[in-house]
Image (tube, grey):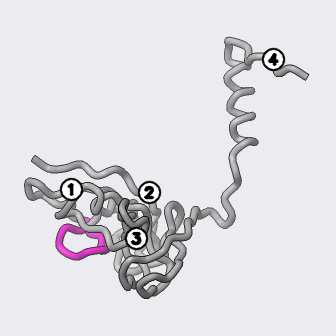
Amino acid sequence: MTRQPYAPNYRGLVDALIDLKEGLPSQTGGKLVVRCVTGEAITTGKAVYIDTPTGTIFKAIANSTIDEATVLGFTQENTIIGATTDILVGGVLATSGLSPGTPYFLSAASAGSITATPPSTAGQFVTRVGEAGASTQLAVRPELPIQLR
């Protein structure tokens, strides 16, 4: 059976979107998690990046390189060096001390930490990591870093 092309109108667009939705994997529990190997000991809830040469994860920071400021997600548990762990790439991170409705950014002062105040020094990176839905919930949506000039 040969698949017919989508109609060049509204109906064709709707059909294409339905096919796309049905073809995508569903997310269980409203979160997206990947498994990675750690390159250092990391505590729960820290922002991490992937070190390209080694393929391992480390705590991200906004005052170093663009790679170290590119947040993959957040750790789900305390880990040791060389451990395989789950990284929350999308979904809700359970944490504390947040201001609901406030966007959060990768910290330039403390590796793996987040802050409501974006970095402002030239050479640092602004990496938005998500928004607080409640004082104990961060909606994780990492964005690409932007270097300040």
The type of residue carrying mark 3 is Ile
Location of residue 133 (image quadrant): bottom left
Above or below residue 15? Residue 63 is below
Measured in 3D between alpha carbons, the distance from the residue under mark 2 to the one under mark 1, in whole angstroms, is 16 Å
Mark 1 surroundings: few (<14), some (14-19) or many (≥20) residues within 10 A: many
Residue nearer the viewer, 132 or 59:
59
Q: Quadrant of residue 71?
A: bottom left
The label nearer to you, 2 versus 1, is: 1
Picture disc at residue 57 = 3
Q: Secondary structure at mark 2?
A: loop
Please tell me whether mark 2 or mark 4 is closer to you in this view: 4
Residue beneath label 4, please?
4
**Mark 1 belongs to which amino acid?**
Phe
Find residue 125 and name its label. 1
Counting from the top left corner in percent of width and height, residue 8 is at 68, 12
Q: Earlier in the sequence, mark 2 or mark 1?
A: 1
What residue is at 81 percent from the left and 17 percent from the top?
A: 4
Q: Which residue is mark 2?
A: 141
Quadrant containing the N terminus is top right
Label 2 is placed on what type of residue?
Answer: Arg
Q: Which residues are magenta?
A: 107-116
